[in-house]
Structures are given as C-alpha cells and as structure tokens.
Amino acid sequence: MSGTIQGTGTTTGTDTKAKPSGLAGDFNTFLTLLTAQLKNQDPTKAMDTNEMTNQLVSFASVEQQIAVNTNLGKLIGLQQTAQLTAAAPMIGQTVEVDSDRLSLQSGTARLRLPAADVAKQAVVRIFDAAGGLLKEETVKLDSAAQDWRWDGRAGTNASQPDGAYRFTVSGTDATGGAQPITATVLGTATAATRLTGGDMQIDLGKLAVGFNAVRSLGIR
C-alpha cells in the first residue's frame, strides 16, 4: 500500500497592488470622510475633540485586531505545511501511537506492552466490529517493554481481513488482582493528511489517528 502526502498551495501571477478591502478599505474611507468633515465643519459647531478621538481609537483597535487575526492565520498555515513536510519521512516507517484499536496490516498487528511492575501479566483481547471476541491471550510481562503480535486469526482459526480492530489490555498482579496497564499500537505509516479543519492525521493502514497520538518513529 502506497502512502500519500496531501497538501495545498497557491501562487499569484500579477504584481498589481490589491485595493484594501473590508475594514481596511472602510478605515481609509473613514479617514477621508473625517478629513472632509473637519475641513467643512461649521466653526461655531466644531466636532467635539473627545468624540473624534474615541472614534479614531475604536476603529484603529478593530483594524489592529483584524491584522493580528490575519497574521495568526498565516502562521497556522505555515505550521500545517511544516507538519506535512515533517510527516513525509514517516511514510513506510513503523510508528508507535496511542489508540484503542490496533492495525492489522498484511495479516500482522502489533502491540507494545509495558514492563512488569505491580502488574505481572497482561490479558489481551481483540474484538470484531460487532463486539465479538476474536482473540484472547495472557502474556507474562518482562523486565522491559515487549511486543505482542497477532496474526489476524480468530479463535476458530479463521483469518480476519486487514483493518482496525478494537482491543483491551488488562493487567493482573502476582496474586491475580486486577491492575491497570496501558499498551501502545505499532504499525506502518501509509499516509499523512491535513483534514478540512486543519488538523493532521496519520494513517496506519485502515487505522487513522491524530498527529498528537504519535509517540515514536522508526520502531524496529
């Protein structure tokens, strides 16, 4: 399965200076009208200087806020482009992510189980889309983190199609008491996409997670 990096870019082919629009254009119009009013006002009924100052300050504050928002939008766009560029080396690499689903790719799925601590064993359960139990296995935890692999076969020995499968991992201590543990998912990155809202997504086959779920890259 090939990976794709999706992004967008725009170019312009003219040197024509754009006329200010929106509040920027209105602000210029406001200054023109204000200047004309000051030139032609009745000397006996001159505009109150405090009122004029307040109008200028209010309009200038709004104009400044619009400029800040515009610059912030540009910064976000640059950041998203940088994320896409940074995602390119991930494609084809094994990455470690946080997810409640594991990715079965080419008939293989991997979980990374934690090192033994209070919990000495882990019970791994894999479920199908309807919630049916496909696989259950008890794994003894080692002194270091270890990988657990699933060959995509269910309890009936039937091979399951590639996809994203929900899983749970529960731990037990030396006496068999329940202990909470967490496991991470390992898979091959196949695509990186910028979504409509601007968020970044990384695909591990049919498992899609946000970039904030990525924990490490280049896992062996």
Image: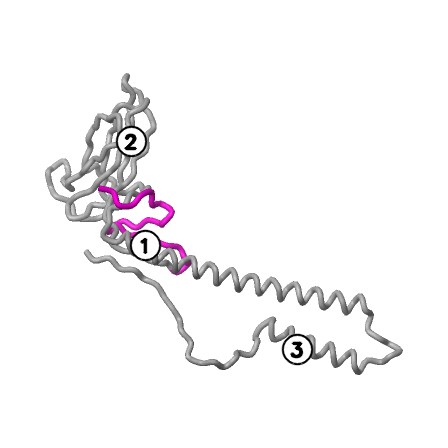
Q: Secondary structure at mark 3?
A: helix
Question: Where 172 falls versus 50 (above or below)?
Answer: above
Q: How far from the left and from the top, in percent, is residue 70?
A: 53, 64
Instruction: Give the residue at mark 1.
Output: 87
Question: Where 131 falls versus 206 (above or below)?
Answer: above
Mark 3–mark 2 Cα distance, whole angstroms, equals: 66 Å
Q: Residue at x 63, y 64 (%)?
A: 62
Asked whether, in this view, residue 37 is left or right of residue 72, the answer is right
Instruction: Give the residue at mark 2.
Output: 114
Give me the disc on residue 29: 3
Q: Over which residues does the magenta segment extend? A: 196-220
Name the residue at the left extreme.
Answer: 157
Name the residue at the top extreme.
Answer: 175
Given the image, on which type of amino acid does mark 3 rest? Thr
Q: Secondary structure at mark 2?
A: loop
Asked whether, in this view, residue 123 is left or right of residue 43, the answer is left
Judge whether residue 197 is colored magenta. Answer: yes
Mark 1–mark 3 Cα distance, whole angstroms, equals: 46 Å
Q: Residue at x 27, y 49 (%)?
A: 207
Q: Earlier in the sequence, mark 3 or mark 2?
A: 3
Specify the quadrant of the image occupied by residue 131: top left
Give me the disc on residue 208: none
Q: Residue at x 65, y 73 (%)?
A: 27
Q: How far from the left and from the top, in percent, is residue 194?
A: 36, 58
Q: Quadrant of the N terminus?
A: bottom left
Given the image, on which type of amino acid does mark 2 rest? Pro
Question: For mark 2, does the 10 Å Cα neighbourhood hold few (<14), some (14 to 19), or many (20 or more) residues?
Answer: many
Q: Earlier in the sequence, mark 2 or mark 1?
A: 1
